[in-house]
Amino acid sequence: MTVLVEMVSDLVCPWCWLGLRRLYEAMHITQDEFRTEVIFRTYQLDPTVPAEGMPYKDYMTAKFGGVGEAEASAQKDRFSAMREALEQYGEAEGIPFHFSGIPMRPNTINAHRLLRWAQGQDNGLAAKEALFKAYFTDHRDIGDLETLADIGEDIGLNRALVADLLKGDADLENVQQEEAMFRQVGITGVPTFIANRKVLAQGAEDAEKLANFLRTAANEYPMETAS
């Protein structure tokens, strides 16, 4: 028996990296019960970010702009507390979050294209992990085409081919349509996990809860009845 999990996520979403690690832990928990196949799906937390990206501090200032000084201070405190919590959660999952010093807030559409191509060569997990690490740990600009070509080469893809594809519109419409479809069905936050196209879980739930989510899909909505 196989459970198909579609993970809807963005590559600048720290909760998504956390959710990915917890999903794979859940798969380890249930590995003797059934097999789980994971497909990564496109979602952009903010598709309005310019193609060239924005300096991270400028982006955050714009995001939290337009409020009073007291409100801005409170938002900053909440944001700092969330980052500290994420770093602690990440440490437990072996994720080296390094939020301080992120230079750029990229547009992620081209990173999703790279992920799509890697996934087509059964290398999706390596690409996903490499892109998360590049952004959150190494502070690389994953909106930059040369950087993406380098990451593609690092995970075994043909660098020249990836660079050439990124310069054009290959699969651009496909990833845009995929994202639009998930927005149309009401997904507004990530990570979102869809199992056997019937069961949905949102957020970076702990591994035991995700294991139960997988069991529900396997036992109540097996693939032969999924549409």
Image: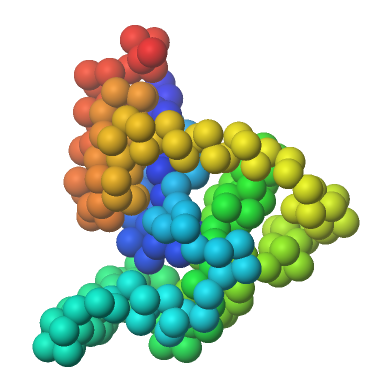
Q: Quadrant of the N terminus?
A: top left
State which quadrant residue 81 falls in. Answer: bottom left
Residue 58 appears in the figure = yes
In the image, 24: left or right of 111?
left
Residue toward you, 211 or 153: 153
Depicted 22 relative to depicted 138: above or below: above
Residue toward you, 85 or 122: 85
Q: Residue at x 12, y 88 (%)?
A: 70
Q: How many marks?
A: 0
Depicted 2 relative to depicted 174: above or below: above
Q: Residue at x 25, y 51 (%)?
A: 203
Q: Quadrant of the C terminus?
A: top left
In the image, 139: left or right of 47?
right
Instruction: Name the spot of residue 125 as percent of width and height, x first.
Output: 55, 50
Q: Residue at x 60, y 62 (%)?
A: 51
State which quadrant residue 79 falls in. Answer: bottom left
In the image, 125: left or right of 69?
right
State which quadrant residue 213 falls in. Answer: top left
Q: Colour scheme of this structure image?
A: rainbow
Residue 85 appears in the figure = no
Instruction: Name the spot of residue 27 as percent of width and height, x first.
Output: 37, 43
In the image, 103: left or right of 183?
right
Query: Please, which residue is most extreme toward the top here?
Result: 225
Depicted 213 relative to depicted 28: above or below: above
Instruction: Name the spot of residue 58 as percent of width and height, x first.
Output: 44, 82
Depicted 128 relative to depicted 216: above or below: below
Residue toward you, 138 or 67: 67
Q: Residue at x 39, y 35 (%)?
A: 182
Instruction: Name the spot of residue 20 as percent of width and height, x first.
Output: 40, 54
Residue toward you, 126 or 188: 188
